Image: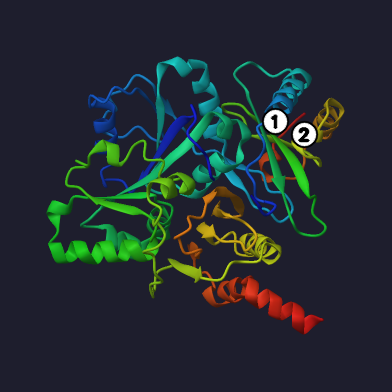
Amino acid sequence: MPRVLNPLAPRREGIHGRMAEIKSWVRWTMGLPEEATVSVTELACQDEGCPDVETVIGVLESGRPIRTFRVHKPISETVREDVETALSFGISGSKNDEKAEI
Amino acid sequence: MPNHPTDKIPVTVLAGYLGAGKTTLLNRILTEDHGKRYAVIINEFGEVGIDNELVVDADEEIFEMNNGCICCTVRGDLIRIIDGLMTRRDQFDAIIIETTGLADPAPVAQTFFVDEDIRARTQLDAIVTVVDAKHVLVEVDRAHEAQEQLAFADIVLLNKTDLVSENELADVEARIRRITPTAVTRRTERCDVVLSEVLGRGAFDLDRILEIEPKFLDHIHHHHHDDHVGSFVLVSETPLAPDYFFPWIQEISQHFGMDLLRVKGIIAFPADDDRYVIQGVHMMLEGDHQRPWKSDEPRTTRMVFIGRDLPRDVIEAGFERCKAENVAEQQCLAS
């Protein structure tokens, strides 16, 4: 049955393994307490000059500003070194990061 | 956000102004004998107590994950709270989020579109907006928030209907329909709606709604309006050319995304036997193949746009250019 290619398809379930790895790398590198939440999201921008796909990592802790880190790759291609580099740069320019201290 | 039945935890968002009846509805949900246990996330403890053991206080923490031209704002507190609730997964069957009267529903809805873990473990069942039939028109005239809470609604509970006349009710319903033509409206007096008409409907999921009600989008027509938030529907009996449609809708969502509150549609493509269902909140778009068109079913494309002062003429001109017959003509002219 013919089907058109779908650029708006829901993200594949397969990325969840890598997402869990990214979270564990963030937790280990930052020494986060168990109650901290790490959020991992992939965003895509179609405009020229913008990163095509970006992995956005948020560290959410009660009573603290959200800290945001970015890797200019899809979740599936992000490796431990990318995460460590992003964390070492710390502040990434978004409003959420203004009070971030890494 | 097409999805199929899973063991994901259903989440119901209750929106509406203070005094509309949200807490009354919430207490009914929590106390009636329906065999389900709910975790409740609330923004503020009201004067009326919540009769439930699993209540978590949220603090409307906005998490901006903007990327290039994509503006994406989600609720960090919800991500954190739902993550925490998952450690007590055996204690509840569903989640209810009660928002404040002035809360912006967009970051709440986007949280369920964007955050990977939330998507994997939960499913936004419906955004239910409770309005006070006697005061809603004044609120809609006075505050953009009231219009936007209606714009995001999948189900509108028109409450306190005993306080207004039948004529007034008809006016209120007509106004609500102009703002949010895809929402289902239920009249109630003291939020005495049958709960199965509000919970577990999968009302946010256009794919699911279309399985139950295949003609869900068919009755929607454009209404002239003066509201800050309005809606229109674009229809085509000609299939759309995917090479034109996808870049166009992505451009629309980026260019007008800040004002595009919701978009829903069924698309027919010429070389595709399936109905294609698309849904979006602001700049977040998602679409998927649904089911094959039936042999006796007209392959009609319908798209509903709900937003703030959207330029219908600009959007409609682009939509027209996506029609396959027009694409062929454009290609002939170019060659």
Subunit under mark 1 = A
Q: Which residue is mark 2?
A: A76
- Where residue B293 appears, as percent x and y from the top left, is 51, 55
Q: Tell me the crowding category of disc 2: few under 14, some 14 to 19, or many 20 or more residues within 10 angstroms, Cα based.
A: some
- Does residue B38 appear in the picture of this structure? yes
Q: Which residue is mark 1?
A: A14
Q: Amino acid at mark 1?
A: Gly
Q: Nearer the viewer, residue B281 or B203?
A: B203
Q: Residue at x 51, y 31 (%)?
A: B122
Q: Residue at x 39, y 65 (%)?
A: B220
Q: What's the distance in space between the residues labelled 1 and 2, CA to CA?
A: 8 Å
- Where residue B201 appears, as percent x and y from the top left, is 37, 40
Q: Amino acid at mark 2?
A: Ser
Tell me if residue B20 comes above or below residue B82 in the rendering: below
- Does residue A65 appear in the picture of this structure? no
Q: Nearer the viewer, residue B252 or B301?
A: B301
Tell me if residue B215 comes above or below residue A90 in the rendering: below
Q: Residue at x 74, y 56 (%)?
A: A46
**Based on the displayed image, in which of its 4 quarters is residue B169 positioned?**
bottom left
Q: Nearer the viewer, residue B56 or B300?
A: B300
Marks 1/2 in contact by CB < 8 Å: the verdict is yes
Is residue B196 shown left or right of residue B335? Answer: left
Is residue B106 shown left or right of residue B201? Answer: right
Q: Nearer the viewer, residue B179 or B258?
A: B179
Tag 2 secondary structure? helix
Is residue B121 shown left or right of residue B154? Answer: right
**Based on the displayed image, in which of its 4 quarters is residue A92 positioned?**
top right
Subunit under mark 2 = A
Q: What colour-coding does the image apply?
A: rainbow
Q: Residue at x 44, y 60 (%)?
A: B296
User: Considering only order in the chain, which callout, 2 or 1, is on the residue closer to the N terminus?
Assistant: 1
- Where residue B21 appears, as percent x and y from the top left, is 25, 43
